[in-house]
């Protein structure tokens, strides 16, 4: 990753962290004045989201400059299960449903598991925090399906507005604009672009995809041939 890209990503992350830190400060103030312990749980969710964004950025900075990241066979179903577990507390806090949807059974794929889990978690946070369309129950789907190019896995939701053009513009603007993905992310989309950086280090960049008629952001992974006879 080039230095300029690192700097843009850092600015995007710093800008996005302003909101959770402000929310934590206000929740702490409210808890102090009212004795409402429920605010402590809210602060915990917010802090966890912010910390995972920082961890993802540090991971992308560590691996982004490597010419080739070592990939190993990884179970995509296990990755999605672990991701769903991490997302569940924030989903409950935001009145959002989380579901895993796999269109079949799959063998291992070649990936860097830590980067893949971090990327999916950040994508999930971004979609969960987006404001639901009026009259709709917000649903976020962790899904995977086969394609001609490999196994497409990603995070999808039932909200309108996500498009290839929007994602392209967001990639050009992150780190320089406060609102890069207005209908997708609840903040400035930093989590989406940190995820993109993590996946690029695996030579599997983030792209727009559809899963069971839902739009989302996904990655195309290649099956592991490790157990096949040569």
Image (spheres, helix red, strand yellow):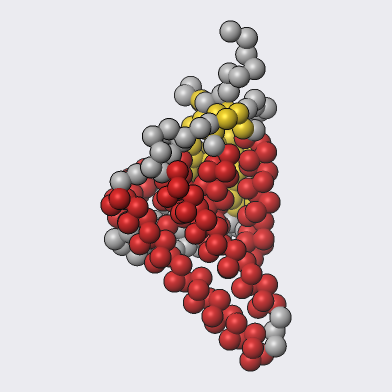
- Is residue 228 something one can see in this rendering? yes
Residue 177 locus on image (x, y percent): 31, 62
In the rendered view, does 219 fall on the left or right side of 171?
right
Q: Position of residue 118 (x, y in %)?
A: 55, 48
Relative vertical location of residue 18 with respect to residue 12 in this rendering, above or below: below
Please tell me which residue lies in front, 63 or 78.
63
The N terminus sits in image quarter: top left
Relative height, residue 208 to residue 104 (above, below): below
Instruction: Evaluate whether residue 145 shows in this view.
Output: no
Residue 127: image location, x then y, percent: 52, 54
| Quadrant location of the C terminus in the rendered image | top right
Residue in the image at 54% along x and 37% along y: 112
User: What's the residue at 49%, 59% (across, down)?
Assistant: 54
- When the figure is inspected, residue 99 is found, relative to residue 112, above or below; the finding is below
Q: Quadrant of residue 183?
A: bottom left
Res. 73 image quadrant: top right
């Amino acid at each position: 990753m080039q230095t300029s890209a690192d700097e843009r990503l850092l600015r995007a992350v710093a800008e996005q962290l302003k909101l959770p830190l402000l929310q934590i400060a206000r929740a702490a103030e409210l808890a102090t004045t009212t004795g409402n312990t429920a605010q402590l749980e809210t602060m915990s969710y917010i802090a966890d989201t912010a910390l995972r964004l920082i961890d993802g950025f540090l991971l992308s900075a560590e691996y982004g400059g490597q010419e080739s990241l070592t990939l190993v066979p990884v179970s995509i179903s296990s990755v999605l299960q672990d991701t769903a577990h991490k997302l569940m507390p924030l989903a409950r806090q935001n009145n959002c449903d989380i579901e895993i949807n796999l269109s079949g059974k799959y063998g291992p794929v070649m990936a860097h598991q830590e980067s893949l889990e971090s990327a999916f978690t950040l994508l999930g946070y971004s979609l969960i925090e987006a404001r639901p369309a009026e009259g709709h129950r917000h649903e976020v789907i962790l899904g995977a399906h086969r394609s001609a190019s490999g196994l497409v896995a990603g995070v999808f939701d039932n909200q309108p507005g996500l498009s290839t053009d929007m994602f392209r513009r967001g990639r050009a603007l992150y780190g320089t604009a406060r609102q890069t993905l207005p209908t997708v992310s609840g903040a400035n989309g930093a989590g989406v672009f940190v995820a993109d950086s993590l996946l690029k280090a695996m030579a599997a960049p983030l792209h727009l995809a559809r899963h069971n008629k839902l739009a989302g952001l996904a990655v195309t992974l290649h099956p592991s041939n490790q157990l096949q006879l040569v």
